Image (cartoon, rainbow, N blue to C red):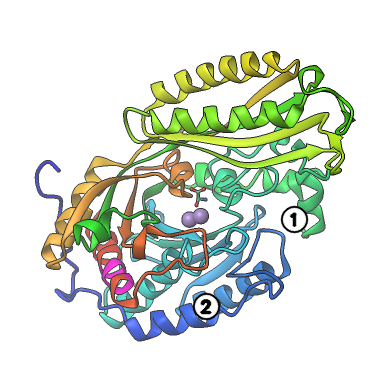
Amino acid sequence: MEGQGRMATPSTGRTPAPSAERLHQDWDELSRFADPDLDGWTRTVFSEAYQASREFIRGRMEDAGLSVTVDAAGNLVGRLAGRAPGAPALMTGSHTDTVRSGGRFDGVVGVLGAIEVVRALREAGISLQRDLIVVDFFGEETNEFGLGCLGSRALAGDLGPAHFDRTDPTGTHLGQRYTGSGLDPDRAMTADWGRREPIHRYVELHVEQGPVLEERGSEIGVVTAIAGIERLLARFAGRQDHAGTMPMGDRRDALVAASEAVLAIRREGCGAPVYGVATTSRVDSQPGSPNVVPGSTSLYAELRSIDPDWLSSAKQRLAQEISAKAAEYGVAAEIEWRHDNDVVPADPDIQDVVAATADELGLTWEAQPSGATHDAAHIARLCPAGMVFVPSQAGRSHCPEEFTSTEHIEKGVRVLASTLVALDPL
Ligand code: HGY
Ligand code: MN
Ligand code: MN
């Protein structure tokens, strides 16, 4: 981390002091919104639990003194007016939707933390020069259409007709789900107000979702980059046969070909030279009857890395290897890659400010890449963006065991608040 970034020097000389008690109370109340029929916490993007939870978030934003609107892309947007109307605004936020049977901290810490920043600024008598925009972004988690960051993508002007044409495994189009949720896809695509209104800086607080901070005993993560993601949909066409009579050597078993692909994908991830991972998350095999050789199979996987060259070379190697291996079983493989997000470097100046702020607050910090993607990856297309991490217990996330202590969250919120103050001067 070169040099020392600007320090948090608020006009009142007081630094914002977030309340751990309020943070915990908000977190505890938000945790009550979840699909009761699933383990862990589930607030998927088109679910009732998610819709209900956003009414709660809206109320907390308004109670904190934010003026709140819902934009055409479904983003909850809270605004705290600054002393210099018209100056490019500061922005912070994250998401409150979850994966299925997920946890209670992913994204939540960044939204509730941002609301607490607003309360802490007001209590400290700190009025920023710039407007502060707090966003609970719509649908950050990758959904069954294979697309995440719906709201931040729209804000950045990257949500288009092809996205709404995507179908889920039932054949429903994403556009139909928007309409069913009261959102107009055409208007959602025009919600790129982030491109029309100049945003000065974006800083997002998030749980690390990995083991590094806890293993190294660091309290704060200064994010250096967000991993790029490439998604794979592979379709295997074999031949459906009687499982009891077709000789093994004559079969064209689509599920066996897909299974070879699962292991090839894993080998790629294990062999990545720089931070890189590869995951097969789902295999659908048809017809799925116990006495039938599978004739067709669909496989869903993803590659992630902070090294764009590895991502593109791994895609090529896998396309060749999966097709060649499938052919050995007489199975045809159709490979479809879908780009999710680029590798996004975090703004160096914001990294410096976060590190200097952590130093000033007497907190230990660690510079680290993010293997998870975030709304910041899309907002970075609008303005310089950075992220602050707090530790995840045992590095677990996207599971009910996900946990970060209120103490760690409060430290992260202090760094977020002071970083925003330090980035405020015109
Ligand atoms: O997929 C991700 O990395 C994020 O948690 N949505
Ligand atoms: Mn997240
Ligand atoms: Mn997530």
User: At 81% from the left edge and 17% from the top edge, which residue is drawn?
Assistant: 250
Q: How many marks?
A: 2
Whether residue 210 appears in magenta in the rendering, the answer is: no
Q: Which percent across, then down, holds residue 49? A: 68, 71
Q: Which mark is residue 183?
A: 1
Q: Residue at x 62, y 76 (%)?
A: 33
Q: Residues within 10 Å of mark 1 (few under 14, many from 20)?
A: some
Q: Residue at x 87, y 36 (%)?
A: 292
Q: Nearer the viewer, residue 151 or 263?
A: 263
Which residue bears the numbered disc 2? 62
Q: What secondary structure is marked by label 1?
A: loop
The quarter holding residue 10 reads bottom left
Instruction: Give the main secondary structure, helix, strand or loop, of the magenta stretch.
Output: helix
Q: Position of residue 64 (x, y in %)?
A: 45, 79
- Magenta range is 409-414
Q: Give above or below for 154 relative to 354.
A: above
- Tell me the quadrant of the picture where the N terminus can be found: top left
C-alpha span from label 1 to label 2: 22 Å
411 falls in the magenta region: yes
